[in-house]
Image (cartoon, rainbow, N blue to C red):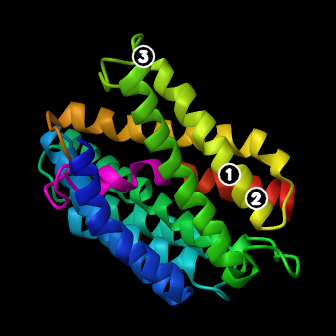
């Protein structure tokens, strides 16, 4: 298992680090590409679960929504307008299904799949809403955009790693086994402790009070776990072990970004509520 995780890291880490090093448009491009692949995998799982959809339309909508979240200077409310356009186009496309019940499921599946994957766009929105860094802080060289996205990435990864290590060593009691049989209460505790410590260190490096990690760490832990379980529920419904075969030992892109789909908007909400 650790060897498989190392192999997946060799595939994922370089483009992420490169995008963070360049910043700006590079981050948007990487996130949009991940959203496109993740949407393809999502619609395939929906089809296997018995839910019709319009995959190309849904994938296009997901990518456009991510780009809207990543582009600055777009009119206020443009995201909601794009959602409205997507809902309308999905409805029109569903009219072609002979059975109205199939058409309704196609309409719902297309909109759901697009909005679900488009949540990844909040990764780039986090860089946009990140508060300015005070001069002279340890991570000042990164800048606010890259610094806060790094906090999100390392926070989610530390939760996943802490939950795996502690759960593997001490995990006995399991929860929600009907969705994901490997999840344990010990893993949740270990993951939450890990993400809280990592978040505290990064908040200090960004010039924020490390004590804020007592709220932000558990928030990332809860939403990352919820994102993982939500994708597991989708795979269970589809009768699939992985979302795809792109990454050795870890299936598809959706298997790697599922936690970020819920954690990213949660961190954005935390920043705009308490730090802006």
Q: Earlier in the sequence, mark 1 or mark 3?
A: 3
Q: Earlier in the sequence, mark 3 or mark 2?
A: 3
Question: Which residue lies most toward the top here?
Answer: 173
With 124 as the anchor, is 10 left or right in this view? left
Tag 3 secondary structure = loop
Circle 1 sits on which residue?
Answer: 199
Quadrant holding the C terminus: bottom right
Do the residues under discs 1 and 3 have CB atoms within 8 angstroms? no
Tag 1 secondary structure = helix
Residue 232, image x and y in percent?
A: 31, 36
The part of the chain drawn in magenta is: 244-262
Circle 2 sits on which residue?
Answer: 203
Quadrant holding the N terminus: top left
Q: Residue 70 colored magenta?
A: no
Q: Residues within 10 Å of mark 3 (few under 14, many from 20)?
A: few
Circle 3 sits on which residue?
Answer: 175
Q: Which residue is depicted at the point 75% across and 46% down?
A: 213
How far is disc 1 from disc 2 in space, using C-alphas? 6 Å
């Amino acid at each position: 298992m650790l060897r498989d995780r190392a192999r997946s890291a060799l595939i994922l880490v370089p483009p992420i680090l490169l995008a963070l090093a360049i910043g700006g448009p590079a981050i948007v491009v990487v996130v949009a590409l991940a959203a496109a692949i993740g949407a393809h995998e999502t619609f395939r799982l929906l089809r296997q679960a018995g839910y019709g959809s319009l995959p190309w339309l849904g994938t296009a909508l997901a990518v456009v929504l991510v780009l809207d979240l990543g582009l600055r200077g777009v009119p206020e409310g443009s995201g909601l307008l794009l959602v409205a356009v997507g809902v309308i186009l999905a409805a029109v496309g569903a009219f072609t299904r002979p059975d109205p019940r199939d058409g309704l499921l196609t309409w719902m599946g297309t909109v759901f799949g697009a909005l679900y994957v488009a949540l990844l766009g909040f990764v780039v929105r986090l860089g946009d809403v990140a508060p300015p860094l005070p001069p002279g802080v340890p991570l000042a060289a990164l800048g606010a955009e890259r610094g806060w996205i790094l906090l999100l990435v390392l926070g989610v990864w530390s939760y996943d790693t802490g939950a795996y290590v502690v759960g593997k060593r001490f995990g006995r009691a399991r929860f929600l086994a009907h969705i994901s049989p490997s999840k344990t209460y010990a893993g949740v505790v270990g993951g939450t402790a890990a993400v809280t410590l990592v978040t505290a260190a990064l908040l200090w490096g960004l010039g924020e009070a490390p004590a804020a990690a007592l709220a932000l760490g558990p928030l990332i832990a809860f939403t990352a776990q919820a994102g993982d379980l939500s994708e597991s529920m989708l795979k269970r419904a589809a009768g699939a072990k992985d979302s795809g075969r792109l990454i050795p030992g870890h299936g598809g892109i959706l298997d790697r970004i599922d936690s970020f789909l819920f954690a990213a908007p949660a961190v954005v909400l935390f920043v705009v509520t308490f730090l802006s």
